[in-house]
Structures are given as structure tokens and as C-alpha cells.
Amino acid sequence: VDDIQGSVAAEFDKHDALVLGTPTWNTGADTERSGTGWDEIYYGEMQELKNLATKKVAVFGLGDQISYAENYADATGELHDVL
């Protein structure tokens, strides 16, 4: 799925496995660190996922390890936390 229209939870429930990517980003907050629309998905719709325990999930991070060495792939950890 490259463009989700409607409910993220409903779209994810359609699949047996998920591969989720997220960028390096850190606003310094403990939660909702990206400061983007993904925060609403992480802390809203993803909480509605009911069948996640039966799915295979892979998470990967993208980012600039030179400019953002302290926070490199930090959003990957946040995605793991909400899953």
C-alpha cells in the first residue's frame, strides 16, 4: 500500500504481513515525536489494530546518520512502541 485512503487500521487488517518504514525525526518529545500526520496514525488509528499478533511485521528506518546521529532511525523505535 503506497497511499492509504480511509482507515489505516482497516487497510492493515487486509494484509497477512506488513513492512513499515519510517524516517529519522525527533522533536524532543517523549511521544508523537515526528510532528507530522504520522503521529495521528501512530497514536490513534494504529491503536485500533486488533489482529496484529497474527501478522508478520517488519519495521525499517530511513534517515541521515551523519546529520542526525543522536536520533538516527528514532522513529523506528517509536513505531515499534505503538505496535
Image (tube, rainbow, N blue to C red):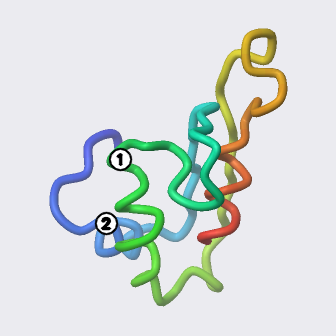
Identify the amino acid type marked 1: Val
**Which residue is farthest top?**
66
The residue under the point 35% across, 61% down is 40
Residue 4 lies, with reference to residue 71, above or below; the image says below
Q: Quadrant of residue 21?
A: top right
Q: Distance from label 1 to label 2 (Cα)? A: 8 Å
User: Circle 1 — which element?
Assistant: loop
Residue at the spot of label 2? 11
**Which residue is farthest bottom?**
50
Residue 13 lies, with reference to residue 79, above or below; the image says below
Image spot of residue 76 (x, y percent): 68, 47
What label does residue 23 carry, if any? Answer: none
- Callout 1: 10 Å neighbours few (<14), some, many (20+)? few
Identify the amino acid type marked 2: Glu
Q: Quadrant of residue 27?
A: top right
Image spot of residue 52 (x, y percent): 57, 80
Image spot of residue 32 (x, y percent): 51, 57
Residue at the spot of label 1? 1
**Which residue is farthest left?**
6
Image spot of residue 65 (x, y percent): 79, 17
Give whichever of discs 1 and 2 has the lower sequence position. Answer: 1
CB within 8 Å, label 1 to label 2: yes
Which residue is more in the foreground, 3 or 65? 65
The residue under the point 76% across, 30% down is 72
